[in-house]
Amino acid sequence: MIYTCTMNPAIDLFSEFTSFDPFVVNRSIFEEYQPNGKAINISFMLKKFGISNMATGFLGGFTGDFIENELEAAGIETAFIKVDGITRINTFIRENSMEYKAVNRGPVISQQAQELLIEQIRNLKSGDWLFVSGSLPQGIDDQIHIEIAKIAHQLGVKLVLDISSPVLLDCLAYEPYLIKPNDEEIANWFNIPDHTDRAELQKAAEQLLERGAQRVLLSCGAQGALYCDSTQELAVNAPSGKIVNTACAGDTMLAAFAGRLMLGDSEEEALVYATAAGSSTAFTSGLSDLSDIPDLAGQIQIKRKWGVKNDV
């Protein structure tokens, strides 16, 4: 079974205005409500690939009900821990070329609710997949990631981590199946001054393997992506297109890469598909509908390493 865990989900409200001025009533010309959270996005994308999965984490209030209803309407099973308070609403306001982002904190998660989530994870079985992605809500220390990594290692669960906290480095001792940092995150963890320095990013990815990660998928926006494991290192360019919204591109990429591996693709095939899928999401206002992936994949070339000209 495949599980996704979002500890700090949200409803994202996108509003568009012809003008946005202080101290007056501004009326939108467009609005859209989207259930969000990094692992929730992974659940939606896996389902688009025909891969059944169960979403868990914490939800509260009417906003939590909306997210759960949207997941279930898409055919995704849910097992969220219900908490006091209201799952957050994040607001994104567009006015011509300007965009304003208001990201809220969300509810405080009790120790009891945290223990219920950990108990859920303890009940997973060897061979199950567990995606843990995104930020943490109030009341949860990032040490919970280490506890989850330890449990997954003990149970033989394939843990996939996409978290920005440097605590990820401490999770590597428990050999997570796959981690997906982006260029800025890995640059921060390894004190790389320029997060576009591909040679340094490559070395850092290799260090993550040496510390215990089984597989590393490094997303680098317009620079493309790098994948490495104990036997190979692959790099791809990013396809060209007009960027609309990059917020969910990394989630799409991770879901597509893992999903294609589940469906039997090689790492090379999965990397090309995932890079195309991530770009497809970046080129639209929501998650990719997958229709343009073949065209985008046609623009992508695989190389053994960045800077090496011979294609795989």
Image (spheres, rainbow, N blue to C red):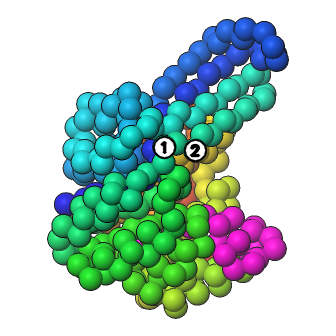
Which residue is located at x 69 percent, y 64 percent? 184
Q: Is residue 180 visible?
A: no
Query: In screen coordinates, is 26 left or right of 271?
Result: right
Query: Where does the image place residue 174, in percent across and percent down from the top left?
Result: 39, 84
Which residue is located at x 39 percent, y 59 percent? 111
| Label 2 residue SS | loop
The stretch of residues the image draws in magenta is 178-198
Query: Where does the image place residue 263, in percent across and percent down from the top left?
Result: 26, 61
Task: State the mark number for residue 105.
Answer: 2
Query: In screen coordinates, is 104 left or right of 107?
Result: right
Whether 194 is among the magenta residues is yes
* Residue under numbered circle 1: 107
Q: Is residue 271 visible?
A: yes
Looking at the image, which is closer to me, 243 or 193?
193
> Mark 2–mark 1 contact, CB under 8 Å?
no
Crowding at dot 2, Cα within 10 Å, few <14 / some 14-19 / many 20+, comes out as some
Whether 70 is among the magenta residues is no
Query: In screen coordinates, is 24 left or right of 221?
Result: right
